[in-house]
Amino acid sequence: HTFNYESMKIFHSSLMMSRLAKSMKGNKSKRRNYCRQSQKYIDTLKTIIEQKGGNNVHRYMIMQADLMAASRKDPEHAVKAAYDKAISLSARSGHVHDTALANELAAEYFISKLPDAPVSESATASGRGRTSSFDRDSMLEDDSDSYWPRQYLANALSLYHEWGANVKVDSMLKKHSAYLDRSMLTVDAPDMADSAHSNGRRKRKGAKHTAATRMCLTTAHKVLAEVDFDAL
């Protein structure tokens, strides 16, 4: 229990430092300081993994990806690849909540890259709060600049819902109303013929999106993003 507590403390401390670093947009000195502190936590967890086993490897990967996002030294495709790797490993390890968290952090990274993130769904629909110009090296484009934020947030929302974190789901729906709505949590209804039970058996529920499903979707999106359709 002490080992698990210390590992989680290190994990969340690192993410707290990287989050503080991200908030230091105009203060490079403080941002570097927070990044150094985050790196210390990462190094500590790496030592623990080497000494006591790999149960925290997926958290180590999440910490690394988030520090890359905070430091602003790496190109977007490298940061995205780091988040995707962390998401994939978290999903394969069966840690639904950490997979959700990694998706949420990736979404927030891409939201921070927007020229002016929309504050409401109505503002997005009317085109207010956005600019037409974009950094040439950005993975986001004028006509699809909300694609990755929406994809990662939808993954996170579904996984938090699967995990049973209803308060978190409600919080995300409120915070990111420009990208999310509750209909994203709706599962396909079972076939009416199959759900008609004359013998009194309980109705069959629609299947939930699993972490494995979300991992497959994320991987598919990554592959599609790398395909040069013009060349084809």
Image (spheres, rainbow, N blue to C red):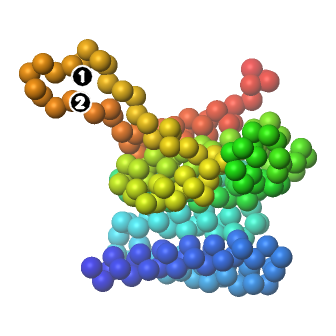
- Please indicate, yes or no, whether residue 123 appears anywhere in the rendered image: yes
- Tag 1: amino acid: Ser
Q: Is residue 59 above or below residue 158?
A: below
Q: Quadrant of residue 63?
A: bottom right
Which image quarter is the N terminus in? Answer: bottom left
Residue 70 appears at what percent x and percent y?
Answer: 69, 69
Q: Quadrant of residue 108?
A: bottom right
Secondary element at tag 1:
helix
Q: Marks 2 and 1: CB-CB under 8 Å? A: yes
- Numbered mark located on residue 204 in the image: 2
- Tag 2: amino acid: Arg
CA gap, disc 2 and disc 1? 6 Å
Residue 55 appears at what percent x and percent y?
Answer: 36, 66
> Residue at position x 38%, y 42% from top?
210
Which image quarter is the C terminus in? Answer: top right
- Which residue occupies the extreme front position in the image? 122
Secondary element at tag 2:
loop
Return the residue at label 1. Answer: 195
Tag 2: Cα neighbours inside 10 Å, few (<14), some, or many (≥20)?
few
Residue 159 horizontal side relative to residue 108, left or right: left
Tag 1: Cα neighbours inside 10 Å, few (<14), some, or many (≥20)?
some
Whichever of labels 2 and 1 marks the residue nearer the N terminus, that label is 1
> Residue at position x 49%, y 50% from top?
157
